[in-house]
Amino acid sequence: MTVTSSSSDSSAVDPTSLPKYEDESGSLMDVLRNRRFLLLWSGQIFSQLADKVFLVMAIAIIASQFQGPDQKISGWVSAVTIAFTLPAVFLGSLAGVYVDRWSKKWVLVVSNLLRGALVLLLPAILSAATRHWWGLPSGFWGLLLITLLVSTLTQFFAPAEQAAIPLIVLRSRLLSANSLFTTTMMALLIIGFALGEPLINWADELAGQLGCSGVGKEVLVGGGYGVAGLILLGLNIPEKRKVGPEVNQHPWHDIQAGIAYLGQNRRVRNALIQLTILFCIFAALVVLAVSLADTLPGMEAEEFGSLLATGGLGLGIGAIPLGQWGNRLPRARLSVIGSLGMALALVGLAFGTQNAWMALAFTGFLGLSASLVGIPMQTSIQAETPENMRGKIFGLQNNAVNIALSLPLAAAGIAETFLGLKIVFLLLATLALFSSFLAWRIVVNSNQTSG
C-alpha cells in the first residue's frame, strides 16, 4: 500500500479540491451531488450489507454441515461470534495507526477485495476438510479462520472510511454526510438480519439452477465485498504523501499519540465517550429486548426483533431531518437534547410498558433521540481531529465501541437476572444522563470561550 497522509494538522478539507456546487449553504442534496461521497457511500452499502449477511451465512453453514441432530447450535455460533469479535476488540487501535500511514483509498479497496476473496475460498475449504482437530471438524476450523481474517480486515476498513469522509466533504456538510451514513447503517442492520436468510436461500437456489450447487451464499457475500472494492477503485481521496521518520516509528508510539491527543482535547474525548455510552445502551437493549418482549401483553419473546427494528427506524427517522437542518444548532446542544431524550425513553421502558404499543413508542423515541447524539458526536470527532490523527482516533474509537458492544451482551442478561428489568433500564438511563452532562460541559465551555 502506498504510504500517504497529510503532513498538515488542518482538520478541514480544502474547498478547492471539491466540486464547485458544494458550497457552505448546501444541504443533503449537495452531499449527494458530491461524486466522491457518492462512491464512498455506495461502497459502504455493499460492504456493510456483506458484513451483516456474513454472520447469517456462517450460521447457515453450521446448521447444514456441522450441527448434529440432537445438538444445540448456540455453541457453534458462539465460537464464530468470538472469532468475529476478537479482532474488533484487540486490533482497532493498531489498524488505525496504519490507516494514517497508508493510502486510505487503497485500504478501502484492498480490504474489501481481500474479504471477498476469503469468502469465495470457503466452499473449497469446506469440501476439502475431512479430518477432525481437537474434537471439531477441520472444516469448522477453516470457517473460524476465515471469520477471523474477514473481521481483521474490517478493522482497517472502518477507520479508513471514517477518516475519508472529512477529506471529501466540506466541514459544514459533515453532519449531513454522517446522517446519510447512519441512516444507511441502521437500514442495512435491519435488512441484513431480517432478509439475510431469504437472500442466501435465493442465492443457493440460483446457483443450483446454474449448476453450481452449494456455493450461492458464498458468491453473494463475497460478491458484495468485491463490488464494494470495485466501486471504491473510482474514488479519489485528496491526500498528501507522508515523509520523514514518523512513517517508520513503532506503532505503539502512534497509539500513545492518539491517547495523548484525547487527553488534551476535551471536546473530542467527550464526544468519543458519548458514542461509547450510546453503543453500550443499544447493545444492552439487544439483550434486554428478549425479556421485555416476554413481559409485554400480546407479545412473545420471539418477537423481540420488532422492538429492535422500531429503535432502528426511530434512529433513521431522526437522521434525515438532522442531516437537512441540523447545522442550525450547535452539535453539543443537539447531544444534550438527545441524551435527555434517551434517558426519558429508558425511564419510560422501566415504568410505562403496560402494553406493547407503548413499549414500541418508547423504543422508537429512544432511537430518534440516539440520532441526536450519535450523528453530531461522530461529526465532531471528524471535524475537530487533525487529518494526521484521524486514523489513530478512529482506531481507538473502534476499540472503545466494540468493547461497549461486547461487554453489555455478557453483562446485561446477568444484571437483569439479579436486579430485575426495571433497575437495569434505570441504570442505563443514568448512563444517558451522564452523557448529557458531558455534552453540557462542552456547551458551557463553548459559551465561556466565546464570551
Image (cartoon, rainbow, N blue to C red):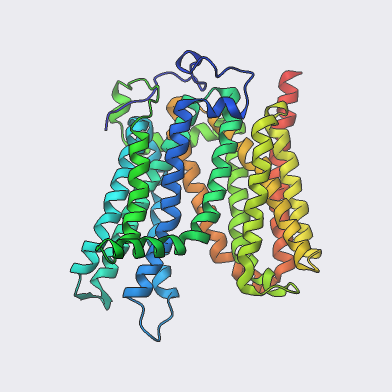
**Residue 442 place in picture, x, y as percent:** 69, 32
Relative depth, front residue between 41 and 386: 41
Q: Quadrant of residue 42?
A: top left
Residue in the picture at 49% in, 52% down: 402
**Left or right of 443, for residue 261:** left
Q: Is residue 248 left or right of residue 162?
A: left
Tell me the residue at 34%/64% (across/down).
204
Residue found 65% across the figure and 47% down from its top: 315
* The C terminus lies in quadrant: top right
**Residue 174 in view of the camera:** yes
Q: Residue furthest bottom?
A: 70
Position of 227 relative to 54 (above/below): above
Residue 414 is situated, as x and y percent measured from the top left of the image, at 60, 71
**Where is residue 61, by image quadrant?**
bottom left
Residue 118 point in image, percent of width and height:
27, 53
Residue 54 drawn above or below residue 36? below
In this picture, residue 21 sits left or right of residue 86? right
Position of the N terminus, as image quadrant, is: top left
